[in-house]
């Protein structure tokens, strides 16, 4: 059992090396913020823009920013994949405390069956999210030789880029 004030052990350490995976995650955060701005959206946008600058890449974060050009279809697919990932979830997404709801389900006699179905659904959603991230990782094709680049905290600091709190670390 964790002490009430020990939240740091529940949150993974932020990255110290920044490659295509961190660019992908920052991209998904910004696409999500475009639809539903949350706390620190501006900081996440600045972080994403900074990473794009380091990778010398311009990615659309809304339908309106997918411009005509040699990569318009790939950019459109990346945006659609990020939007699809954003929509992928379970009915339990967003619940931080659900004790009363679980108690009601148990009182109705459907608690155990519900938990079993939700467990299976969660596994399916986790697999789907992993596939979405793999699809988005294909953005490295847009980077060419730059796809192998990995930046350090010192590189980010030298470029004036501050790491932002990723959306998946924020409470709903």
Image (tube, rainbow, N blue to C red):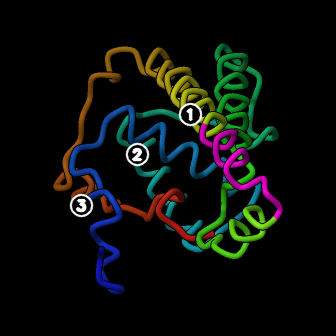
Front-most of 116 and 34?
116
Q: Quadrant of the C terminus?
A: bottom right
Residue 168, position as x, y percentages in the image: 51, 56
Residue tagged 1: 123
> Can residue 34 be found in the magenta stretch?
no
Q: Earlier in the sequence, mark 2 or mark 3?
A: 2
> Can residue 118 be found in the magenta stretch?
yes
Residue tagged 2: 51
User: Residue at image x 58%, y 44%?
Assistant: 28
Q: Earlier in the sequence, mark 1 or mark 2?
A: 2
Q: Earlier in the sequence, mark 1 or mark 3?
A: 1
Front-most of 159 and 126?
126
Residue tagged 3: 157
Circle 2 — which element? Answer: helix
Q: Is residue 143 left or right of residue 5?
A: right
Q: Quadrant of the N terminus?
A: bottom left
User: Residue at image x 47%, y 24%?
Assistant: 137
Q: Quadrant of residue 107?
A: bottom right
Between the residue at mark 2 and the residue at mark 3, the CA separation in whole angstroms equals: 12 Å
Residue 166 in the image: above or below residue 52: below
User: Which stretch did the figure color magenta?
Assistant: 108-119
Residue 57, position as x, y percentages in the image: 48, 33
Residue 114, position as x, y percentages in the image: 72, 48
Circle 3 — which element? Answer: helix
Q: Please, what is the dominant secondary structure of the magenta stretch?
A: helix
Q: Quadrant of residue 98?
A: bottom right
Within-10-Å neighbours for mark 2: few <14, some 14–19, many 20+: many
Circle 1 — which element? Answer: helix
Q: Of the residues tagged 1 and 3, which is closer to the observer?
A: 1
Q: Of the residues tagged 1 and 2, which is closer to the observer?
A: 1
Residue 124 in the image: above or below residue 112: above
User: Residue at image x 48%, y 37%?
Assistant: 24
């Amino acid at each position: 059992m964790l002490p009430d004030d020990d939240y740091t052990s529940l949150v993974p350490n932020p990255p110290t090396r920044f490659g295509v995976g961190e660019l992908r995650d920052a991209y998904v955060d910004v696409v999500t913020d475009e639809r539903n701005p949350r706390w620190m959206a501006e900081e996440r946008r600045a972080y994403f823009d900074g990473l794009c600058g380091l990778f010398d890449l311009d990615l659309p974060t809304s339908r309106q920013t997918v411009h005509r050009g040699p990569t318009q279809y790939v950019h459109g697919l990346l945006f659609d994949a990020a939007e699809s990932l954003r929509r992928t979830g379970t009915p339990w997404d967003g619940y931080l405390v659900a004790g009363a709801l679980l108690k009601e389900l148990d009182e109705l006699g459907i608690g155990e069956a519900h938990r079993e179905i939700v467990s299976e659904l969660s596994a399916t959603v986790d697999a789907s999210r992993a596939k979405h991230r793999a699809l988005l990782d294909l953005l490295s094709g847009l980077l060419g030789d730059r796809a192998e680049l990995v930046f350090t905290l010192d590189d980010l600091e030298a470029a004036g880029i501050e790491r932002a709190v990723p959306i998946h670390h924020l409470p709903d």
